[in-house]
Amino acid sequence: MRRSEKVIITCAVTGSVHTPSMSPHLPVTPDEIVTQSLAAAEAGAAILHLHARNPADGSPSGDPALFEAFLPRIKQSTDAVLNITTGGSNGMTEDDRLAAAKRFSPEVASLNMGTMNFDYGAAAIRVPQWRHVWEADYVASSGDRIAHNTPRFIERVIRELGEGEGTRFEFECYDVGHLYMLAQFADRGLVKPPFFIQCIFGILGGIGPDIANLTHMVGIADRLFGDDYHLSVIGAGKHQMGIAAVSLAMGGNARVGLEDSLYLGKGKLATSNAEQVAKLRRIAEELSLEIATPAEARAMLGLKGGDAVRF
């Protein structure tokens, strides 16, 4: 792992797992996504990981027109790196998931490194009443849907975005096998270092949120990639800050945001993405770590620069 005293904070602003009925603070409209993205960047996020939603009902969407309603506005007001999802949601087609990133050619795009179960049905427990008709079935049926990320699709993303656009990737690894999948593409020369490896803990279907799993993932990544990668982590739900803090102490980076957890602390909803970023920043500074600026994050990750995107 490349250890640095400069910590890259990524903020995942809205995602596709949580629904509007789960929190009144989840950004849905382009205006809300812009407002919360800019506040998160101001709080210390060097990278903003972005999904789009239908403004009428908050359902996830891969429509490039919806991304276009917020991407240029965010870029005009902050130097933060804008990261466009290729994960979308597990009900979208491959073309839907790729459409926005191919149109806008971002500096960074997320790339999930393996097909898996991705069950978030338990998120419905705290919802007394659904605001929109799509939400209940969408959440309940997550246990029956497969998050489709085959080796063929991964290679398609790498070739069309990486080779075709100069986009680099946030490699999302939900289990140890995903690290080996990434290593196979690295061995073939299809992806090149430095790798930005985002290890995710606590999704039902992926590796559990035990600290021992984090140290195990780091040990395997060290053997596979040596000093050619930057570690970042996601702790889903209540595990968000604990997993993040351990990563920082190990020399890694971390991602927070309302995509990954709706809470700031036990029983307390976060009122914004910026609240979570500010909390993580405080943790980092208490560990005598400095927060990476967007320019420093670009240099660390070898990005092409904000002037090379199409928005």
Image (cartoon, rainbow, N blue to C red):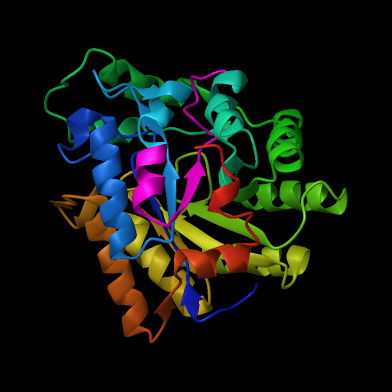
Q: Nearer the viewer, residue 300 or 238?
A: 300
User: Can you give x and y, in whole percent of width and height, for residue 258 in the image?
Assistant: 30, 46
Query: Is the residue 261 above or below the residue 15 in the image?
Result: below
In this view of the protein, can residue 58 be seen by the observer?
yes
User: Can you give x and y, in whole percent of width and height, for residue 247 in the image?
Assistant: 48, 70
User: Can you give x and y, in whole percent of width and height, for residue 311 in the image?
Assistant: 49, 37
The image quadrant that residue 264 belongs to is bottom left
Query: Is the residue 10 above or below the residue 211 in the image?
Result: above
Q: Residue furthest toward the bottom?
A: 288
User: Can you give x and y, in whole percent of width and height, for residue 218 in the image?
Assistant: 62, 67
Query: Is the residue 85 above or below the residue 236 in the image?
Result: above
Please report the residue visible at 53 percent of the width from the left and 65 percent of the height from the top. 297
Q: Is residue 179 magenta?
A: no
In this view of the protein, can residue 27 be seen by the observer?
no
Q: How many marks?
A: 0
Q: In the rendered view, does 151 fall on the left or right side of 16?
A: right
Q: In the rendered view, does 58 fall on the left or right side of 212?
A: left
Please report the residue visible at 48 percent of the width from the left and 34 percent of the height from the top. 118
Please report the residue visible at 50 percent of the width from the left and 25 percent of the height from the top. 90
The image quadrant that residue 197 belongs to is bottom right
Q: Nearer the viewer, residue 175 or 110?
A: 110
Query: Is the residue 93 above or below the residue 102 in the image?
Result: above
Q: Residue furthest toward the right?
A: 188
Instruction: Please state, as top left, top right, bottom left or bottom right, where the N terminus lies in the image.
Output: bottom right
Q: Nearer the viewer, residue 41 or 186?
A: 41
Q: Residue furthest toward the top?
A: 133
Please report the residue visible at 38 percent of the width from the left and 47 percent of the height from the top. 76
The magenta stretch spans which residues? 72-93
Q: Is residue 89 magenta?
A: yes
